[in-house]
């Protein structure tokens, strides 16, 4: 990992930790929503050593592949291995899967369960793909319109470009957060974001759904 990306991860971890500390002054519990993939690993590791009353912090995911939590593609596994460590081991993690065979079968149960978390989230940390997707809001998803419009917390998603079905927090639920951070690396992602900033068709680049709210962008080459 480059020094610039390592420093970016540490700066983001400090900003997120400070946001959580600020909200914990007036709230008994706070909620942090994180994204999966390879980009946030260094951020997770940096955040895990931040001094916080982690026993009062709930953590969940912006989206998840409908796979076992021990699967190498599981975002829950990524969080457990890299974030729920060190100081952050005492945080309460809520995974976005059930024992049901499909996300369509499990989504109603999960919707009921996520409502018990400390909404609105203090922080949502979003990622972005080269196709402009964020969470599991993919431009080629049959459920994109639903995920953008639904008032439900979660939406089951199937996307031709992705091998596994997924579940995602809806755009509305992600919007409700007190603070939004976008964590991206690489020149290709910078160019995608630049394109997103010059247009308004959310269906082509779903990250645009979050450019109208205050969004702290953390980028390194």
Image (tube, rainbow, N blue to C red):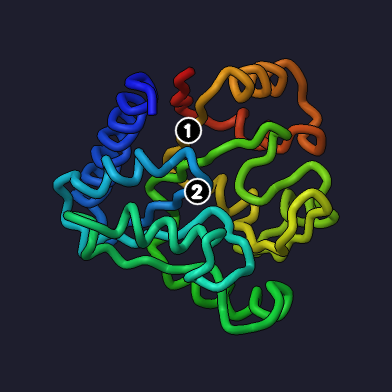
Q: In the drawing, does residue 52 fall left or right of residue 95?
A: left
Quadrant in the rendering for residue 195: top right
Q: Is residue 153 visible to the viewer in this orientation of the structure?
A: yes
**Residue 213 x %, y %:** 56, 32
Q: Quadrant of the N terminus?
A: top left
Q: In the drawing, does residue 42 fall left or right of residue 207?
A: left
- Label 2 neighbour load within 10 Å: few <14, some 14-19, many 20+: many
User: Disc number at residue 108?
Assistant: none
**Residue 89 x %, y %:** 23, 62
Q: Nearer the viewer, residue 162 or 20?
A: 162
Q: Earlier in the sequence, mark 2 or mark 1?
A: 2
- Circle 2 SS class: loop
Q: Is residue 28 visible to the viewer in this orientation of the structure?
A: no
For the point 28% across and 31% down, the residue is 10
Q: Are marks 2 and 1 in contact (CB under 8 Å)?
A: yes
| Disc 1: which residue | 183
For the point 21% across and 58% down, the residue is 54
Q: In the drawing, does residue 198 fall left or right of residue 23?
A: right
Q: Nearer the viewer, residue 102 or 57?
A: 102
**Residue 196 x %, y %:** 70, 23
Label 2 to label 1: alpha-carbon separation: 9 Å
- Label 1 neighbour load within 10 Å: few <14, some 14-19, many 20+: many
Q: Is residue 109 above or below residue 57?
A: below
**Residue 147 x %, y %:** 72, 54
- Circle 1 SS class: strand
Quadrant in the rendering for residue 107: bottom right
| Disc 2: which residue | 35
Q: In the drawing, does residue 114 fall left or right of residue 131?
A: left
């Amino acid at each position: 990992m480059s020094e610039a990306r390592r420093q970016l991860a540490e700066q983001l971890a400090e900003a997120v930790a400070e946001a959580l500390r600020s909200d914990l002054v007036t709230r008994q519990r706070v909620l942090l929503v994180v994204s999966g993939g390879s980009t946030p690993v260094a951020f997770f590791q940096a955040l895990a050593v931040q001094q916080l009353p982690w026993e009062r912090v709930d953590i969940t995911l912006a989206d998840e592949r409908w796979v076992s939590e021990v699967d190498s593609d599981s975002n829950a596994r990524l969080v457990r291995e890299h974030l729920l460590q060190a100081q952050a081991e005492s945080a309460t993690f809520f995974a976005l899967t059930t024992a049901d065979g499909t996300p369509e079968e499990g989504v109603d149960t999960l919707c009921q369960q996520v409502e018990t978390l400390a909404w609105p989230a203090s922080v949502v940390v979003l990622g972005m793909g080269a196709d402009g997707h964020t969470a599991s809001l993919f431009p080629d998803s049959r459920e994109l319109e639903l995920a953008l419009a639904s008032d439900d917390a979660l939406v089951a998603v199937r996307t031709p470009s992705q091998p596994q079905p997924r579940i995602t927090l809806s755009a509305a639920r992600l919007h409700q957060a007190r603070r939004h951070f976008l964590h991206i690396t690489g020149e290709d992602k910078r160019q995608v974001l630049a394109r997103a900033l010059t247009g308004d068709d959310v269906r082509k680049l779903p990250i645009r759904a979050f450019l109208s709210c205050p969004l702290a962008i953390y980028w390194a080459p």
